[in-house]
Image (spheres, rainbow, N blue to C red):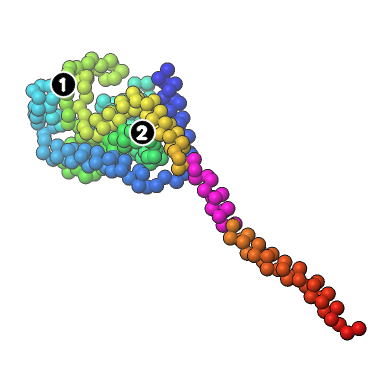
Amino acid sequence: MRRRQLLRNLTKIRTGLLADKNIPLKDARKFFLIAGAVVLLDQIVKVVVKLNMQMGVAGQIRVLGDFFKIHFIENPGAAFGLTISKLVNTVGLDMSESTGKLILSIFSLLAVIAIGYVLYRISTHKSPLPYYVALIFGGALGNIIDRTFYGVFFSDMNYYDGGLFFGRVVDMFYLDIGDLPLPEFMGGGTYHLWPIFNIADAAISIGIVVLLIFQGRFFKMDEKAREAEKNTPEATASPETPKEESGADERPSEAPSAEKTETVSPLESTSPTEEVEDESNAPA
């Protein structure tokens, strides 16, 4: 049921993207500012951590005992540390880590562009939907900056071979709630039940979770708001206004013609009488 509803709402988004041709920039500006604020905060925290903390357990800071720590690591892959090369190798294909990293970075860049376009097109949506898409856009943009530029900006201090599109994402927030054994096709070993994350990851997660739970309500809010706008007195009276104005413009044009008729008709009625009087006064 929820899956069908999600597909219907995705269809509505697609229809809205094609229907609204001209969207004022001012309607989308505030959502891009929200995304920009996420990127700014995310990058400030990442740069401070990268320049001032030692990686791993040696440099971690306990905030709430062993439960919540500031633990600096660098993620070479996507969410949960997965890399494309590792996933491809598990199915029997051969791909180097650098090739997988390049594919991931380019794909992430294209995804960010697509999310930004969607955010612009749905900025007139009359619900909180654009706010959460802005969080997703800002978080995705924050992480793509790491992948694209950190291999260049911090090349002197990186412990890996960097370059454009070969940077690694800086993570630092660690909720230690236990470990999960991983199967062999995922590399084996154990995995922290709550991965180490950053502000960009948090923004993306919040946006996705809220959209998955409340997307049906958001679209109903938009439909009701648009129906209410159609039923307002201004919207119903606006089609009749041109007719009234055109009728008012036609009245002055009829008045001169009536006056012209009244001034001409007495002249026409008296002209035969004057001709009869002239004939009777004529000499016999």
Q: Does the magenta segment cover residue 240?
A: yes
Occupied quadrant, residue 269:
bottom right
Q: Does the magenta segment cover residue 209?
A: no
Occupied quadrant, residue 158:
top left
Occupied quadrant, residue 106:
top left
Q: What element carries label 1?
A: loop
Q: Which amino acid does label 1 sit on?
A: Asp
Task: Give the labeled residue for mark 2.
Answer: 127
Residue nearest the observer in this picture, 174 or 51: 174
Residue at point 24%, 41% (across, down): 37
Left or right placement of residue 165 versus residue 4 in this view: left
Left or right placement of residue 227 versus residue 142 in this view: right
Horizontal and vertical percent for residue 160? 21, 36
Q: Given the current orientation, which residue lies at the most extreme right position?
A: 284
Horizontal and vertical percent for residue 125? 39, 36
Left or right placement of residue 34 versus residue 279 in this view: left
Task: Give the labeled residue for mark 1.
Answer: 176
Range of magenta residues: 236-250
Tell me if mark 2 has few (under 14), some (14-19) or many (20+) residues whose alpha carbon lies within 10 angstroms of its own.
some
